[in-house]
Amino acid sequence: RSSVAILALSVSTSPFRTQSFQFTAVSSRCHPSALYSTTEEPEVISPITGSVTNVKYPTQRGAEVDSRKIINYNEKAGEGVNLALRLSHILFASEELANQSLEKLTRAEWNFEDMAKIVSNCAETREEGGNIGWVNLAESFDASWEGEEKKNPNEHLNEILPPSARQQIFSQSTKPGDIISVESRRGVHLIQVVDVMVDVRKLSFVKARNNRKKDYLFGRSGEISPEEWKKGGKLAGVLGGALFEDSSVDPTELDLTYKIETMGCQMNTADSERIEGQLMSLGIRPLMDDEYMEIEEVKNNGGLVAERRKVKKEKKKPDVIVLNTCSIRDHAEQKVYSYLGPHAKRKRAGEDITIIVAGCVAQQEGQSLLRRIPEIDLVMGPQYANRISDLLEDVANGNQVVATEASHIMEDSTKPRRQSSVCAWVNVIYGCNERCTYCIVPTTRGVEQSRPVESIVDEVKELVEKGYKEVTLLGQNIDAYGRDMIPKRKFSDLLRTVGAIPGLERLRFVTSHPRYMSLGVVDAVAETPTACEYFHVPFQSGSNDVLKAMGRGHTREKFLQIVERIRQRLPDAAITADVIVGFPGETEQDFL
């Protein structure tokens, strides 16, 4: 660990104003790899738990960053963790037409859905914007794969997407957002991978508790009656009510409540909104601060005096505790354990509560959290924020669950519970491929995974329809948006596309990286009326030597070039930045 000062810098770029600086001194965590460089993955011991850090993604410079290779689900049909792909397509008569259209899609001149409605030769899917739907990956193309018990799960798609086309798709490693070209007897298909369905329970570590309630919940052979769900505790009762359509279990009878505590950055805030959306879809409601419950106390003196009954009010406590954690600073890590203490005590006293640790500390520590605080029920990394309902099934079955394996990010099946009715966060890219020597983000949030343009546009349109005025596009390294896709896309094109959505009044984005922030992004902001004239570009140091030691991949001259471009196009734009002072090896001259 190294104690350094991080400065929040606010610079007015107007030539007529004096530059102003705002400094905030904090204690920050310096990633262990900042102190040495090696070509091999180091074994890092966590200073919190004393265990080896739970590394699920490559973290060294030069290591593989393609999520298709790191998260490889190409296993034997029906045996992998990848269950299905949601696909759309545009059918063309020739390869030449398909290639020309792909170029227009790459440059964001067309939207995939709109193009499908206008030019696709597939009458069956044209009106639905080329939507094929979910394609089951359990299909095998082995000639010996036959029999009633092995019926082709995609047979209903044969006239839309013939088996030869599906075989070509399955043979390639793809991820959501990719557009690939395949041929069939119908012509040439441009296939867009819209979403992926992953069996998150297969990716999870599940440990049975000693006091688990057997035979009542998931995993029991045979059908489980709704009444039996009630015997498994409050969480099991609520899940039973949510999962049984014709169920006598009424989740509202149990009145299960949750409380979520969020630490850290805007990404964690957005993740918490998604977690809350999942919990509320299960019938678990947020606990209000002013809720109380009545408790009856009975006193007697061994029968000599009649019983005296007294009713007192006590503040109601949540049944589900969610702590969405941050590991960028030592203080934030330590706060995890102090926060969980009272809730762990409640559980040891026999109260029926569920304790969930999510976010970056959860990803970093993994199973070691269970050893330090055995009362924890679920440990899950950021990539599982919108799949908490799936993981809670195993928790309700009396297990402890750890979900930190690398996984493709799936689209939300439920809607986030927004904290504002005016401004909304919208994730556009997850993870970071950079290897800054002081930063733990690649370890905890994984490699970059960009969302499909269409998914982002649909989410923003829905927000505008609900009355939202302002949207902030989120990414740990937002300028890298699209570089992980096939074919590659540009963030500047995404800005223009989202900014043109009717009804949207203000568009913001964070966080930019000087190494990747193109001058085209500045131009896009200048040319998009809804885009706010605001840039957050952390340069971290003004010394090229320190920047090299940090592994930032840019120079002070590159940052100043960006600032100059902003001043030329948007003289009154605001620029904010993060600066690290006291980096290991920094000299007085570097500082000056």
Image (tube, helix red, strand yellow):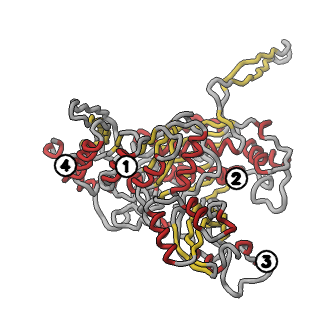
- Camera sees residue 362: yes
Residue 473 image point, x, y percent = 46, 46
Instruction: Please report contact status of discs 2 and 1: CB closer than 8 Å, yes or no.
Output: no
Instruction: Please report contact status of discs 4 and 1: CB closer than 8 Å, yes or no.
Output: no
- Camera sees residue 361: no
Instruction: Please report contact status of discs 3 and 1: CB closer than 8 Å, yes or no.
Output: no
Marks 3/2: CA–CA distance: 28 Å
Looking at the image, residue 55 lies above or below residue 93? above
| Eye-nearest disc, 4 or 2 | 4
Looking at the image, residue 38 lies above or below residue 459? below
| Eye-nearest disc, 3 or 1 | 1
First in residue order: circle 4 vs circle 3: 3
Quarter location, residue 107: bottom left
Quarter location, residue 534: top left
Marks 4/2: CA–CA distance: 51 Å
Residue name at image x 59 percent, y 55 percent: 411
Marks 4/3: CA–CA distance: 66 Å
First in residue order: circle 4 vs circle 2: 2
Marks 2/1: CA–CA distance: 45 Å
Horizontal arrangement in the rendering, residue 80 relative to residue 95 (left or right): right
The residue labelled by disc 4 is 543
Residue 542 image point, x, y percent = 21, 46
Neighbour class for label 3 at 10 Å: few (<14), some, many (≥20)?
few
Looking at the image, residue 357 lies above or below residue 74? above
Outermost front residue = 118
Task: Identify the amino acid type marked 3.
Answer: Glu
Give the numbered dot on residue 149.
Answer: 3
